[in-house]
Image (spheres, helix red, strand yellow):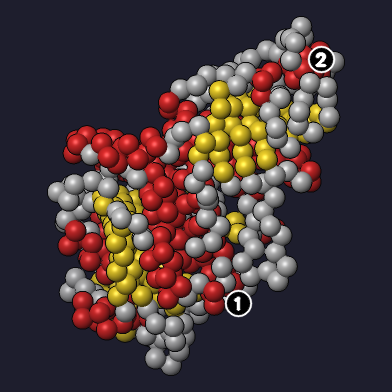
Amino acid sequence: MNFEFQKLSLSHAMTASVDAMVVLWPSQVQPDTQAVEPVSRLLAQAIAHGDFELKAGALLSLYSQPGMAARHVVVVCSADNQPGQIRSAMQAAWVALKAGKIKRLGLHVVGEASVQGLQMALSSLADASYNYTTTLSKPKARMLKQVLVSATHDRAELRQAVAQAQALVAGVELAKEWANRPANHATPTHLAETAKSIASGRAFKCEVLGPKEVAKLGMGAFMAVAQGAAEPLRFIVMRYNGAAASQAPVVLVGKGITFDTGGISMKPAAEMDEMKYDMGGAASVLGVFKALGLLKPAINVIGLIPATENMPDGLAVKPGDVVTSMSGQTIEILNTDAEGRLVLCDALTYAERFKPQAVIDIATLTGACVIALGAVRTGLFSSDDALAMQLQHAGEASGDTCWRMPLDDAYAEGLKSRFADVANVAGRAAGSVTAAKFLQRFTKSFAWAHLDIAGTAWRSGAAKGATGRPVGLLLQYLLTAAQATPTAKSHGKSKAAVKSGVKSKVKARTAGKA
């Protein structure tokens, strides 16, 4: 999908060569009954006859009207242009249009277009029109290929917003692709190959460690999870170097359990197929790196992905086993289905060597977080108030929201063990918090945040599939950090690369497949 930005009035937008046009109309702009251009006039007539109200989600569908080049024109009210309102408006518009074989779509924003509004509109449109095809015998090609974005005002930040939306969609759709793939099409080896293909540019490096290298590092917790799997583990280290080598990097750690049976503590059969999504954290790291390659911000980022299956083989780790983590801390494994924290704790210890400015781990970690926050907000846990606030602000700005949860020391009481330094689970109460408290033990040397995406990384039911979250939140955080970092000012080359992607035509292609 390609995005293109042009400065056009509403009347000129109606003459654009597109199959369909979506007009986002905020409630504070009143249509003109005497207007020369037809959309405003028809909308005013519909309001006058009580057939349309300027309220969120209201939709007026027009077909082959005089003065409109597009066969289909949909006017949809975006109310106050809040992110949720724009998302709902774009979803409603696509439902009205998707049967019309739309390949080239126009999107015109009435009134004062905002950076946040444009990004939300485009990402929502991409989400609504996305379809997974990889393992279908007769896949249907994606219908929508191009979007012409137009607004009355032409500002540099609007063009940059379109470029950022292009990169965001590329990253989100790559994350969706890999999280949606069945486990036999998304093994640890497959993830490693994809990471290498993403990190093939001049600013990138990628190293993949196998079982021997991981054993040499002493990653006993990671190896314990992997020892029951026939598929060999992979520890993926991705580097994006967009700033001076002296600038401390941000480290992203993505949980990469490519299939989770629960191990010896096996999960019930119902909905176990969804455990292919248990590498949603890893998929989001891959997606972020895809977007970084398109935007080229002045920041250094490390991506760490401990990837393995969690299987109930005869060699699998057993409840009650004690293993030694890379940090030297011993762990009593009371439940083998609490494996995500075991692979993450060794990756967090590995992150220390980069002397990071911040470390953020991303994981489909606990069902308890789903109970607490549902599918609306990602659970945020952090030992650093400034980092937590930055992530919260990034979530609000991107529409990929999170909510900070507590980390009181009293929550760690249930992790005490008579037979090791720590147990890998506590009781059922506050399960997402005790999981975060376990991870916190391995993060004392750096600012750290944990994003529990168990409720937000995928949808169940009829719309089953990966969401690509929290790529939007992470990308917004990194772009903001790049602008705020003093050393970034000396790296005009990287910022110029960002600006070069915001010309009137943004031709970077989104990645449905690696």
Q: Farthest residue toward the left?
A: 246
Query: How far across and down, in percent of the image, does residue 226 sit?
Result: 38, 81
Q: Residue at x 35, y 40 (%)?
A: 497
The numbered dot on residue 252 is none
Q: In the image, is 99 to the left or to the right of 471?
A: right
**Count of marks placed on residues:** 2
SS category of the residue bearing label 1: loop
In the image, 374 versus 76, the foreground residue is 76
Q: CA distance from mark 1 to mark 2?
A: 56 Å
Relative to residue 438, is residue 314 depicted above or below? Answer: below
Query: Is residue 1 visible to us here?
Result: yes
Name the kind of residue labelled 2 in the image: Gln
- Residue placed under numbered mark 1 in the picture: 269
Q: In the image, is 498 to the left or to the right of 144?
A: left
Please identify, in this view, whether the residue under mark 1 or under mark 2 is nearer the observer: 2
Name the kind of residue labelled 1 in the image: Ala
Query: How far across and down, in percent of the image, does residue 284 sit?
Result: 44, 56
Q: Residue at x 43, y 93 (%)?
A: 314
Q: Residue at x 74, y 37 (%)?
A: 19
Q: Residue at x 67, y 37 (%)?
A: 105
Query: How far across and down, in percent of the image, does residue 484 sit?
Result: 26, 35
SS category of the residue bearing label 2: helix
- Residue placed under numbered mark 2 in the picture: 45
Relative to residue 342, is residue 141 depicted above or below? Answer: above
Q: In the image, is 484 to the left or to the right of 502?
A: left
In the image, 471 versus 450, the foreground residue is 471
State if disc 2 and disc 1 touch (CB < 8 Å).
no
Q: Residues within 10 Å of mark 2 (few under 14, many from 20)?
A: some
